[in-house]
Amino acid sequence: MLTRVCRLHGCNDLRIEEIPVSPPGPGEVLVAIGAGGICGSDLHYYQDGGFGPVRVQEPIILGHEAAGTVIATGPDASGLAQGDVVAINPSRPCGNCPYCAQGLFNHCLEMRFNGSALRMPHEQGLFRDRVVVGAGQCVRAAPGILVAEAACSEPLAVCIHAAGRAGDLAGLKVLVTGSGPIGVLCAAMAALRGAAEVVVTDLEDAPLAVARQMGATRTVNVAREPGALAPYAADKGYFDVCFECTAAAPAIRSAIESLRPLGTLVQVGVTGDVVIPLNMLVAKEIAITGTHRFQPEFAEAVALINSRAIDVRPMISQSFPLERAEEAFSAAGDRTRAVKVHLTFG
Ligand code: ZN
């Protein structure tokens, strides 16, 4: 059997190709992918051939945010049956390294992550009609949940992990800088965890409208209203926690300005080196923490989507069939309109 795949051969060289797919082996299932979200990293691979030190060095099938329907099960594919709609966890820690032994699976030394060019050979991704994956990678979606919703489990898992890095959010005042998919999901998590206020910033109006649908209590277009955050900086700052989702120096600066003393900056957005106002960080005793991927949070993400405790539907801006992948990638890069763009498969 052949399957269509969406494979990147280099910068701006995306090809729809056919490759063989073998039947599922022991502990594996064959999934017909229904929807796959285009992530910022997919976009960087496509537009720039990578990001930071991570470069595309060989053809790579993109995609790590996918869900589909089980169409065949191998022996010992426990708990799954034909017809199950599942979200696929792209993260496959080794289970044996020192970090896995401590339960820090997201720091696994031998991590295999679908659609990642971090290692050679690259880990192939999920933008394809059919894929064989481990049954353990699959978490069932509830009846009535769209496959496109289930495909949002991976970015939601990232944000559940980020929320965990901030600690208890109940009653807190939360700032989210950047209203892309990760920003709106951080806002949704803050609202779910009982934050008293969730203020979200961006340079575009369309993603801010989505943020309001997903839990923001106030949104600020900092391009149109550059001074709008200034009042939050009075008396040494206002917010208890900031989820910084842009990795842009001006946003990091305004986050540190508007955090109160002893506040927490969770750095979610990623970039290379960036200037930060260290004097203010030190003087206000602000804690800064990174957040990286997830592991147990994936199942939690599917559960939150299954119950619609977090309704991801507002963030899915557009869907394109696989054969229109280039159009989909270009739509995903248009922040004036898109939050999350999905590919759909046959
Ligand atoms: Zn490991």
Image (cartoon, rainbow, N blue to C red):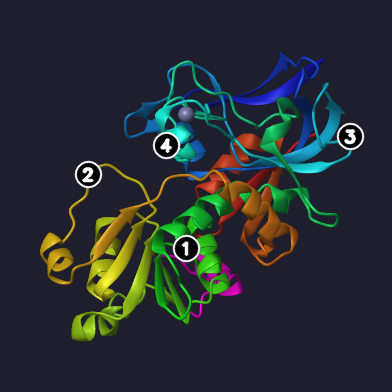
Please check the rendered image and state whether residue 204 is part of the magenta-colored stretch, yes or no. yes
Residue drawn at (49%, 62%) of the image:
186
Residues at discs 3 and 2 in contact (Cβ within 8 Å): no
Q: To which residue does mark 3 refer?
A: 82
Disc 2 under 8 Å from ligand 1? The reply is no
Badge 3 or badge 2: first in the primary sequence: 3
Badge 1 or badge 2: first in the primary sequence: 1
* SS at badge 4: helix
Q: To which residue does mark 2 refer?
A: 273
Q: In the rendered structure, which amino acid carries the disc numbered 2?
A: Asp
* SS at badge 3: loop
- Disc sitting over residue 179 in the figure: 1
Q: Left or right of 65: which side holds 41?
A: left
Separation (CA) of disc 4 from disc 3: 33 Å
What range of the chain is rendered magenta?
202-218
Residues at discs 1 and 2 in contact (Cβ within 8 Å): no
Mark 4 Cα-neighbour bin, 10 Å: few <14, some 14–19, many ≥20: some
Q: To which residue does mark 4 refer?
A: 107
* SS at badge 1: loop
Q: Left or right of 258: which side holds 22?
A: right
Q: Quadrant of the N terminus?
A: top right
* SS at badge 2: loop
